[in-house]
């Protein structure tokens, strides 16, 4: 297939390109480097099946045919990014999704939307199944990301129902691995970077809020299975193993051999108290579940951070 992948220079996007090229596809990577990096895609430049287009998907997208699949992964995804770029976050979720769907409609291509567990907001049920409608503050500081993704899901399914486009929607839960930015702002890269530098490890709130952490290779496998499936409605992909943030901080401190102290700061507004995917649908419909243990995946990620210190 010839696949248009928006946001391909990001953390997840670059790993996905690696897999798509490895499976024999042609990939058009589109990115404006708001949060992505040329370093992430430099390895693909000599591959004749790889193309790069520097473009902001919030503006009209013009690509030459054929396009067999449009995969929309463009968006700031870390709180520090979407709080710094609130309007651009809303635009890429709305205008960007509309433009990407327009390409799929024009070329009769399949469409894949990268959504997020953030559509569940600060959930009142745990774990969160795809049938849960969420508990989101639409006008809070995190609302720019939450509502952008909720709108993008609604628009994607509207195109499926109105135009018959074969759509896929993945709700990605916390994922980590190699090529994350040191200043990403999310828990795992923050903890690793601080531990390796011997700096205080910052935990927000009392650290008892929970998350589920999935390794990047497991996520990519879930993406591939979903894109080749007959599912059109949202599907959770994430690790159902639930950990508190203080547990994750202590595990990373132990694995890095760091003497960093754990310090506590105020919990950001609307920060979720729990986050854990119900992956029943992924297990039953895709035959997918995470394979790489937290300890093994952290070991690989810590090693990458050591080799790429800043």
Image (tube, rainbow, N blue to C red):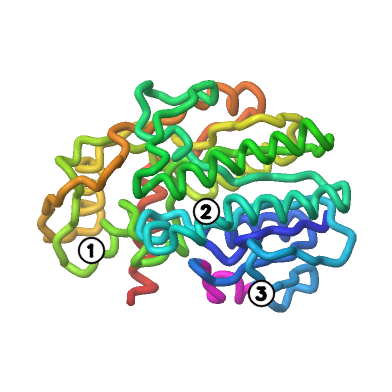
Lower sequence index among marks 2 and 1: 2
Residue under numbered circle 3:
54
Q: Count the marks: how many?
A: 3
Q: Quadrant of residue 184?
A: bottom left
Report how far apart the C-alphas of labels 2 and 1 lie in the structure: 31 Å
Residue 188 in the image: above or below residue 230: below
The residue lying toward the viewer, choosing from 97 and 231, is 97
- Residue at 20% x, 45% y is 267
Image location (x, y in percent) of residue 136: 40, 34
Residue under numbered circle 2:
90
User: Is residue 207 left or right of 29 when viewed as pictured?
Assistant: left
- Residue at 78% x, 52% y is 102
- For label 3, count other residues whose C-alpha is less than 10 Å away and answer few (under 14), some (14-19) or many (20+): few
Image location (x, y in percent) of residue 82: 42, 57
Quarter occupied by the N terminus: bottom right
Quarter occupied by the C terminus: bottom left
Report how far apart the C-alphas of labels 3 and 2 lie in the structure: 20 Å
Q: Nearer the viewer, mark 1 or mark 3?
A: 3
Report how far apart the C-alphas of labels 1 and 3 lie in the structure: 33 Å
Which structural element holds mark 3?
A: strand
Magenta part of the chain: 36-43
């Amino acid at each position: 297939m010839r696949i248009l992948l928006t946001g391909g220079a990001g953390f997840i996007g670059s790993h996905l390109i690696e897999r798509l090229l490895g499976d024999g596809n042609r990939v058009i990577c589109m990115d404006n480097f708001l949060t992505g990096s040329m370093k992430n895609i430099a390895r693909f430049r000599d591959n004749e099946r790889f193309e790069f287009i520097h473009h902001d998907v919030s503006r009209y997208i013009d690509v030459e045919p054929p396009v067999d699949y449009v995969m929309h992964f463009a968006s700031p995804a870390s709180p520090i990014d979407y709080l710094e770029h609130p309007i651009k976050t809303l635009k890429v979720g709305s205008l960007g999704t509309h433009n990407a769907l327009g390409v799929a409609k024009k070329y009769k291509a399949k469409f894949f939307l990268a959504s997020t567990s953030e559509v569940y907001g600060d959930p009142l049920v745990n774990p969160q199944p795809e049938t849960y409608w969420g508990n989101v503050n639409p006008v809070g500081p995190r609302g720019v990301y939450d509502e952008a993704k909720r709108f993008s899901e609604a628009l994607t399914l509207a195109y499926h129902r109105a135009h018959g486009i074969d759509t896929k929607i993945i709700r990605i839960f916390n994922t980590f691995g190699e090529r994350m930015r040191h200043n990403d702002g999310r828990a795992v890269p923050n903890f690793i970077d601080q531990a390796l530098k011997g700096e205080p490890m910052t935990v927000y709130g009392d650290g008892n809020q929970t998350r589920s952490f999935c390794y990047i290779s497991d996520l990519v496998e879930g993406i591939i299975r979903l894109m080749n499936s007959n599912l059109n409605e949202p599907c959770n992909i994430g690790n159902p193993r639930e950990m508190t943030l203080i547990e994750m901080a202590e595990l990373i401190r132990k694995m890095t051999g760091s003497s960093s102290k754990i310090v506590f700061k105020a919990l950001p507004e609307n920060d979720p108290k729990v986050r854990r995917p119900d992956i029943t649908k992924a297990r039953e419909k895709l035959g997918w579940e995470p394979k790489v243990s937290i300890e093994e995946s952290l070991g690989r990620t810590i090693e990458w951070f050591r080799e790429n210190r800043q």
